[in-house]
Image (spheres, grey):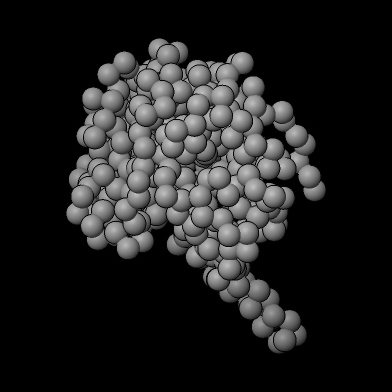
Amino acid sequence: MRSQWLNALAILASVLAGSLIVVANTKHPAAHYLPNASYDPTRELYRELNPLFEAKYEGERGSGVAVRQSHGGSSLQARRAASGEESPDVVTLGLPSDVMIIQNRGLIAQNWRERLPNQSRPYYSTIIFVVRKGNPHGVRDWPDLVKGEISVIVPDPKTSGNGKLAALAAWGAAALRGASESEARDFLRAFYAHAPFLLPAARAAGDAFALEGKGDVHIAWENEALREVEASRGALEIVYPPLSILAEPSVAWVDANVEKRHSERLARSYLEFLFSEEAQEVIAQNGYRPFDEAAVRRHAKRLPPMELFSIERIAQDWMDAQRKFFGEGGIVDAVYTPKPRAE
C-alpha cells in the first residue's frame, strides 16, 4: 500500500514538474505580429536578428512583438506576396526585381527604395563555388564548369534568386571578357547542360550537394557556401572565381498590407533595425556583406574583396534583366530544357 502511495506521489510530482516546465517555456502572446517573407537561405540570419529586434522594440515601446518568418525561393516568395497567397508586412528578398514584382501589383509604393538607407539594401552578396575536398576537378573559374563530365548543382532561375544570379554571373563572366551575345548564349547553354537537374530554391540545391553527395560543384550564395563548408568539417571547400556578380538583396514594407493592419510604424522600425550597428554585425557574422564600412573591415578575412560586376554591365537594370533572361521566351528558356531530378 505504501509503495502504491509513493508511486502515485512520484507520478503526481512528475506531472507537476512537467507543467512547470511548460509554463516556464511558454512565451506570453505578443501584442503585435510581424510577418516577414524572406528568401530561402536567410533562415539562420533572421533566427538571430528577430529576437534582438523583439527585445529592442519591447524595451523602447513597452509592447511585445513577434516576427513570423516564411522562406522560399526569392521569386516564388515575390509571386506569392503579389498574388495574395501570402500577406507579409515586410519582404526581405534576394533581388530588387523581386520586390518590384510586388510593387507592380500596386502593393508596394513606387518610392520604396528611397524610404530606407542605401536604397533599401541592408547587405550585399555574390555567387561563388563550393567543391569537394581537394578540388578534384580543379575548378577555379566559370569556364571550368563546362569541361569534361563535371556536374553542376544550381537552383532554378525561374523560382530562385540564387538561380537567377548564377545565370547572370555565368553570362557576365563570358560577356565581360569579350564573348559575343551568341557566344555568351552558347556558354550558358553548356553551363545548364552540366546541370543534372534544377531545384526550386537555394537550400534544396545546397542539401542535394552537401548532404546527398550530388554533383561536383555547387553554385551558391556566398553565405550558403560559408555555412556548407563550416558544417562539412573539412569535406568541402570554397572557390572564389576571379569575377562574379554583385547581388543586391532588398527589403520593403508592403504598403497595402500594413495599411490594413495599421502596422507601418512597426514594419518601418523592423527594417530600419537591419541597418543598425548591432544588426550589421550579425549580418556579417552570417556571411552577408554588410553595407556598413566598419563591419566590412572587421570581417574582411572571411568576406574577402572580390571583383564584382553590377547588373548595369549586362542589362539596363534588374527589371530589364528579369525580362531579358527570365521572362517567357527569354534567354534562359532558349538555352535550357528542363530535366527531371535524378535520384
Taking the image as shown, residue 68 lies to the left or right of residue 51, namely right
Q: Look at the image and tell me in which quarter the N terminus lies.
A: bottom right
Residue 136 drawn at (x, y percent): 63, 64
Task: Determine if residue 29 is in view.
Answer: no
Q: Is residue 298 visible?
A: yes
In this rendering, would 313 be left or right of 220? left
Residue that appears at 64% across and 22% down:
334
Rendered view: 129 above or below 107: below
**Which image quadrant is residue 163 in?**
top right
x and y, in percent, of residue 137 in the image: 63, 59
- Residue 18 falls in which quadrant of the image? bottom right
Q: How many marks?
A: 0
Name the quadrant containing residue 199.
top right
Report the residue at 70% width, 54% height from top.
Answer: 214
Q: Residue at x 58, y 68 (%)?
A: 134
Residue 218 at x, y = what percent? 59, 51
Q: Position of residue 44 (x, y in %)?
A: 46, 53
**Residue at position x 45%, y 62% in the image:** 24
Q: Is residue 318 above or below residue 307?
A: above
- Most extreme residue toward the bottom is 2
Nearest the camera: 130 or 55? Answer: 130
Q: Is residue 54 above or below residue 252?
A: below
Front residue of 88 and 295? 295
24 and 85: which is toward the camera? 85
**Residue 15 vertical placement versus 191 (above, below):** below
Task: State the residue lying farthest toward the right.
Answer: 343
